[in-house]
Image (cartoon, grey):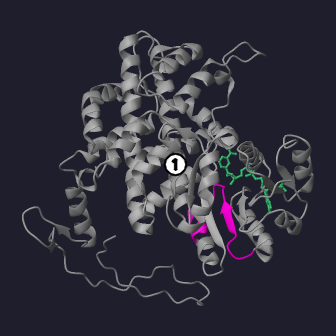
Amino acid sequence: MAETNYGLVGLAVMGANLTLNFAHHGIPMAVYNRTSSVTEKFLAGEAQGKPITGADNVRDFIGLMQRPRRIIILVKAGPAVDAVINELRPFLEEGDVIIDGGNSFFQDTIRRDREFQGTGLYFVGMGVSGGEEGARYGPSLMPGGPREAYDLLEPALSKVAAQVADGPCVTYIGPHGAGHYVKTVHNGIEYGDIQLIAETYNIMKHALGLSAPEMSEIFARWNEGRLNSFLVEIASTVLGFIDADTDKPLVDLILDEAEQKGTGRWTSQNAIELGVPIPTIDAAVWSRGISALKEERVHASSILQGPRLDGSANGSGRYDREHLINALESALYAAKVSSYAQGFALLRIASDTYGFELNLSELARIWKGGCIIRAELLNTIQQAFEQDPSDRPMNLLLAPHFAQEINNLQSDWRYVTGVARELGVPTPAMNASLDYYDSYRAERLPANLVQGLRDLFGAHTYRRVDKEGYFHTQWEARPEPELVEAVPTVPPAVTGEDDPVEQTTETSRT
Ligand code: NBP
């Protein structure tokens, strides 16, 4: 086989497809998998006739590559990554680069990056988005770690990444765990998008009584406009799919329990830690959680009632079909913009907090192809963040283009959430997006009362709008603590072994 610097460990779905992608672009690959039968099967199957060679042990695998080696690990995130690193480490030499391409927790990547510092070896944490097809034909790549390691990888990564009009969907994300952090938030945004699409489908279904194939056509039409995106396109595909066994729309036969692997939850957890509001993504995460309570929900549905509507149980006939469909398109778009505004606000704050030096415009650019959230909208987001720093919006909602659009769309957005409320159709993400918008644009929120309450019960202090400084008020006349007679807290012990504890009672504040 031709000489190569590139190797890959982990030949499951992602690893096998990414290897084929590298080979397709003329980059010979060495491969290794813990279970050697997987390697043998791959070499004898899809890898046949391609510049791909493999080994059944790490020593031979390392021997297949020239220095400096660039070894991509694509195994299950977590301890498996450390196990592979520990296996490889004794054979690595100065200048070699390890690239973890799985969905690793970014704090693990920060730790691994630290462990590699000063060893002469490099560690790169690289987010890979696009699933099986992306890995094979062009993913969006988010590599983070030492800049000099990225420079070594850049020529190959630029070839295997998805290509869009303004370049390959890869860029240097930033130091330490920046790549995996950005991939995590990408997945959080993906959770939000998917939930918003599902809620839009649910409102349409309940308010208009449309069939799945009818809704498939509506999503296909929307995909030709400002909602153009991979997820809206595949929503149309899934809704239009007819099950061959039953001749029914397959979507109607799929159990309504959504699963999650962790990146959405990590996004929410991190946002809470940083104090950044991302309610749409949070709603998407807990919606999957409540979906998993199928048995409880079925039970509750026979006890807890929804709104009492005149006429039919669903909304059929209540709403003008074309008007509602158009409003749903506006609401989905507006809610999506609000969700992206939250996601990018989180990226901005995290970049400052962790020193990731993120370029938000570049992130929007590399998400335009290959990845699950690829969408027309990202062009406008890219442009908004390309502005001179002084003109760059603090929040996407403030970018003139989006501000004008949302100002025009908000009445449709409110109408749609109102319809959902009227019908009792749950729309947590759609509402969270709108509430974020209404909160963000509120000159005055009721946090003044929150502060007053906190100061009353906990002397937490507050600031005033008319004076500088922190204030505490004695809100109510407080009775002097009163000493009362000693009261036994336990009945006198019959055995005489436990003496009653003497206590004084005092006015207490929680
Ligand atoms: P999996 O996440 O299913 O992992 C399977 C691979 O991990 C196999 O090669 C397996 O080897 C290896 N492995 C395990 Br499990 N434990 C190991 C250990 N202790 N030592 C060595 N190898 C071990 O594979 P995947 O779905 O291809 O995903 C790979 C990574 O890419 C994951 O982090 C995933 O989250 C991420 N990702 C996946 C997708 C997707 O669409 N699937 C998309 C984006 C990112 P074996 O054959 O010996 O069991």
Which quadrant does the C terminus fall into? bottom left
Q: Please name whichever residue, 67 or 468, is drawn nearer the observer in this view of the structure.
A: 67
State the residue lying farthest toward the left.
466
Q: Position of residue 67 (x, y in %)?
A: 74, 68
**Is residue 352 positioned above or below 304 on the image?**
below
Q: Position of residue 201 (x, y in %)?
A: 51, 25
Residue at x 57%, y 62% (from the top left corner): 151
Residue at x 41%, y 17% (from the top left corner): 325
Q: Please name whichever residue, 156 or 360, is drawn nearer the observer in this view of the structure.
A: 156
Q: Please name whichever residue, 294 or 392, is drawn nearer the observer in this view of the structure.
A: 392
Q: Please name whichever residue, 48 or 235, is drawn nearer the observer in this view of the structure.
A: 48
> Mark 1, residues whose alpha carbon is within 10 Å: few (<14), some, or many (≥20)?
many
Q: Position of residue 18 (x, y in %)?
A: 72, 47
Part of the protein shown in magenta: 93-110
Q: Position of residue 365 (x, y in %)?
A: 46, 44
The answer to whether residue 98 is magenta is yes
**Is residue 182 positioned above or below 438 on the image?**
below
Q: Is residue 288 left or right of residue 226?
A: right
Look at mark 1 in the image and give the residue it sits on. 186
Residue at x 87%, y 55% (from the top left corner): 54
Q: Tag 1's secondary structure?
A: helix
**Is residue 129 positioned above or below 243 on the image?**
below
The answer to whether residue 464 is magenta is no
Asked if ligand 1 lies within 8 A of label 1, the reply is no
**Is residue 207 positioned above or below 477 on the image?**
above
Q: Amino acid at mark 1?
A: His
Indicate the quadrant where residue 136 lies: top right
Is any atom of residue 241 visible in this view? Answer: yes
Is any atom of residue 372 visible in this view? Answer: no
